[in-house]
Image (tube, helix red, strand yellow):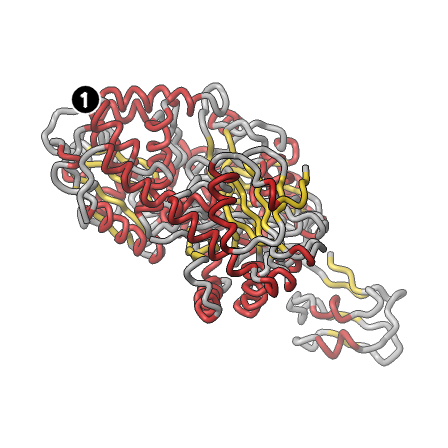
């Protein structure tokens, strides 16, 4: 291929595709061809840049100019001004705190500055559909190194040295897990990639698979070599069609280059990789349920032992790791375990990818060294709370995790520090909440999810979460009883201790942590029949302040339930029995006479 | 497609694709061409095309080629700046496509400023 003076990278992650990046891509290609500039400027569709909320994102190299919210209509200007004349299009540039004059380089933007990208190092930087671009970024160098210079034992030792722990949330030391499977007797072994990401607000694995699928495949190849496996599965939910499409292409390309298949690099190591599309059951993220699903059985967990390392897929020794764990392996083998272990805290090494969502200015995907504080993630990388509201809590670890408060903002994130305060690392969901979020409602939301996803095999999870949800629903409706809180704690603790798998063992976490840190909100719901955040509609009252009301009749006219009465120029009244709590009256009132209580 | 058997095979692919990502990592040397209306009128596009042709003829992959707007010295366009390593930014004036191979050979490759075409230096 020829030399291109400039590369224009357009995000092709799911976030940016849904905000229209494909149209931008087409417009650019067409526009450049019309100007005869398609031979000098390369247009590349990449994986997720992480800053999804500012999408579609376009980065122009070599300058590294970061454009955001680019539409197809902006393309002619972009071509004419920047690509032809070298003049940056100021209005499309990412502006941090309103300083339009200085154009920050991609890496200087606060959102990226604090990040340290290892798993995500190629996401948004290379074309995920091109194995050559992956190789240009040292891709498959770790595989060549391992197969030509290292014994399988040495690979495991290197992973042990790195201190890498399971990024799916369990946090089990990866090297140790590998050594169990490697030691297990058997001529047939499997390695499996758990890509059954399903928690609300989490998209780490999806972005990795979409943005750098070769890294995941290379990681699995290294694991297979280390453990003596010759077959592998990637279990990815069917709701991730783009990830599956790119994975299929990845496997094709790696096979063409002889990096998958028989006698890889001319050695005796052979490896065959399959993709299994899951149907989207959350419980299939549990390893034994996942394997049952691959085998074609109903996805339900079974008691362990036997552990998968001894009896896994089809009864053969197997090793399951999550997408992010696998994606870290090539960098560890290439740079050495000590290089990786130099980052992070004493017991939690390396970096972790988080999906930052909720009431925060910059939602998206962030990768930070372990030991970074929640404050740094939310306020420095995330740019603080939306609309200048007050930070209230952060739900970390998805529906299995816990709610932490402003008192926990300065905790350095690690597996240990989070479990000490009742949360878990989880796969890396980070949902930020502000003063308008009702914590009882939040706990109910997450429990609704886990309750619906409970597979029903063991009674504590099946019946217990249902009972807890009944109680929460009652509290939110203003029908809570003082003894409910004790019942919730009793049930929650019981479910945690007696459930069969991780789903049930962690499902009560959101309720238990909110009870621990926001008990006053539960008490307000029960004792005062009041929702302090004004989020629970059944407890909300709209009341017209008779002193302020000017009798303009605007509220009565917008009320969809005809609940407001009153003569012109006289104070109006809301009939609480008819009111549907839509809030339209409060919005319509010109003198702010309607209170939400 | 040939199968990869050795580290050398992998390196070959890497070499041939370096410029794919080379342009994205800001080359060691930067060539900046004035592409204001004045520059374009004076033939800056032809200069840029000559730069690209020379770079690909020589297989130079760690050089980034950028364009920039008018800096006010319209009488000396086309302007071509070279920033070699961490050195000062050298501006060449009245650059024609014929001057390009010499500037690249002397300055970009060997680090010697082409004295007779220089019109300024910026630190």
What percent of the width, then of the height, locates residue A342? 46, 21
Question: Residue at (59%, 60%) from the top-left corner?
Answer: A85
The chain ID associated with circle 1 is A
Q: Residue furthest front?
A: B116
Please name whichever residue, A468 or A108, is drawn nearer the observer in this view of the structure. Answer: A108
Q: Is residue A69 left or right of residue A10?
A: right
What percent of the width, then of the height, locates residue A227? 20, 28
What percent of the width, then of the height, locates residue A71? 55, 65
Please name whichever residue, B82 or A109, is drawn nearer the observer in this view of the structure. Answer: B82
Q: Is residue A141 left or right of residue A357?
A: left
Q: Residue furthest left?
A: A187
Question: Residue at (30%, 54%) from the top-left corner?
Answer: A244
Q: Is residue A118 visible?
A: yes
Q: Is residue B61 left or right of residue B92?
A: left
Please name whichever residue, A194 or A297, is drawn nearer the observer in this view of the structure. Answer: A194
What percent of the width, then of the height, locates residue A226? 22, 27
* Rendered view: A48 above or below A112: below
Placement of the C terminus of chain A among the 4 image quadrants: bottom right
Residue placed under numbered mark 1 in the picture: A183
* Rendered view: B28 above or below A162: below
* Rendered view: A384 above or below A172: below
Q: Is residue A513 visible?
A: no
């Amino acid at each position: 291929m020829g030399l291109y003076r400039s590369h224009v990278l357009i995000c092709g992650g799911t976030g940016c595709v849904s905000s229209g990046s494909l149209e931008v891509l087409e417009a650019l290609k067409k526009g450049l061809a019309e100007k005869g500039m398609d031979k000098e400027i390369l247009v590349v569709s990449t994986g997720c840049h992480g800053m999804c909320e500012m999408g579609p994102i376009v980065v122009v190299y070599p300058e590294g100019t970061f454009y955001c919210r680019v539409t197809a209509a902006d393309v002619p200007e972009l071509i004419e001004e920047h690509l032809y004349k070298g003049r940056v299009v100021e209005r499309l540039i990412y502006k941090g705190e309103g300083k339009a004059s200085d154009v920050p380089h991609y890496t200087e933007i606060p959102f990226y500055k604090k990040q340290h990208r290892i798993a995500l190092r190629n996401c948004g930087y290379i074309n995920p559909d091109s194995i050559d671009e992956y190789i240009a970024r040292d891709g498959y160098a770790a595989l060549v190194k391992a197969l030509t210079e290292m014994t399988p034992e040495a690979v495991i030792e290197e992973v042990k040295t790195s201190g890498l722990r399971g990024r799916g949330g369990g946090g089990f030391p990866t090297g140790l897990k590998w050594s169990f499977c490697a030691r297990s007797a058997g001529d047939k072994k499997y390695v499996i990639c758990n890509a059954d990401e399903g928690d609300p607000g989490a998209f780490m694995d999806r972005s990795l698979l979409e943005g750098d699928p070769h890294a995941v495949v290379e990681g699995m190849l290294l694991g297979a070599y280390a453990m003596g496996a010759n077959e592998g599965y990637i279990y990815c939910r069917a709701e991730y069609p783009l990830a599956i499409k790119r994975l299929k292409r990845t496997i094709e390309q790696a096979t063409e280059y002889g990096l998958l298949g028989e006698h890889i690099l001319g050695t005796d190591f052979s490896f065959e990789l399959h993709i299994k599309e899951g149907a989207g059951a959350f419980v299939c993220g549990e390893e034994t349920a996942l394997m049952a699903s691959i085998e074609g059985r109903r996805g339900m967990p079974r008691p362990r032992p036997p552990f998968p390392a001894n009896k896994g897929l089809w009864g053969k020794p197997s090793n399951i790791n999550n997408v992010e764990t696998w994606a870290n392996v090539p960098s560890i083998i290439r740079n050495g375990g000590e290089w990786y272990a130099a980052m992070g805290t004493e017991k939690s090494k390396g970096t972790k990818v988080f999906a930052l969502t909720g009431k925060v200015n910059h939602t998206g995907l962030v990768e930070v060294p372990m030991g970074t504080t929640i404050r740094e993630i939310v306020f420095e990388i995330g740019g603080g709370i939306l609309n200048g509201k007050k930070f209230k809590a952060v739900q970390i670890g998805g529906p299995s995790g816990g709610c932490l408060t402003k008192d926990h903002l300065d905790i350095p994130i690690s597996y240990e520090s989070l479990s000490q305060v009742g949360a878990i690392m989880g796969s890396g969901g980070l949902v930020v909440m502000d003063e308008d979020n009702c914590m009882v409602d939040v706990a109910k939301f997450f429990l609704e999810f886990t309750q619906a996803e409970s597979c029903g095999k063991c009674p504590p999870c099946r019946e217990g979460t249902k009972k807890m949800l009944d109680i929460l629903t009652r509290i939110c409706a203003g029908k809570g009883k003082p003894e409910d809180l004790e019942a919730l704690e009793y049930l929650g603790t019981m479910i945690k201790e007696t459930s069969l798998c991780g789903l049930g063992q962690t499902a009560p976490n959101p309720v238990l942590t909110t009870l621990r840190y926001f008990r006053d909100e539960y008490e307000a719901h029960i004792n005062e029949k009041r929702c302090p955040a004004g989020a629970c509609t059944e407890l909300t009252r709209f009341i017209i302040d008779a002193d302020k009301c000017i009798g303009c009749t605007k509220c009565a006219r917008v009320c969809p339930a005809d609940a407001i009465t009153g003569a012109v120029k006289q104070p109006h009244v809301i009939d609480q029995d008819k009111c549907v709590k839509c809030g339209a009256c409060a919005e319509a009132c010109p003198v702010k006479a309607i209170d939400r209580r | 497609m040939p199968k990869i058997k050795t580290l050398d095979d992998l390196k070959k692919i890497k070499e041939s694709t370096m410029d794919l990502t080379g342009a994205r990592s800001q080359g060691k040397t930067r060539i900046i061409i004035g592409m204001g209306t004045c520059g374009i009128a004076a033939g800056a596009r032809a200069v840029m095309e000559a730069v690209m042709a020379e770079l690909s003829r020589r297989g130079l992959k760690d050089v980034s080629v950028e364009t920039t707007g008018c800096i006010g010295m319209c009488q000396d366009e086309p302007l071509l700046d070279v920033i070699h390593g961490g050195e000062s930014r050298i501006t060449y004036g009245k650059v024609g496509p014929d001057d390009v191979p010499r500037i690249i050979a002397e300055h970009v490759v060997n680090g010697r400023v082409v004295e007779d075409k220089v019109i300024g230096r910026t630190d």
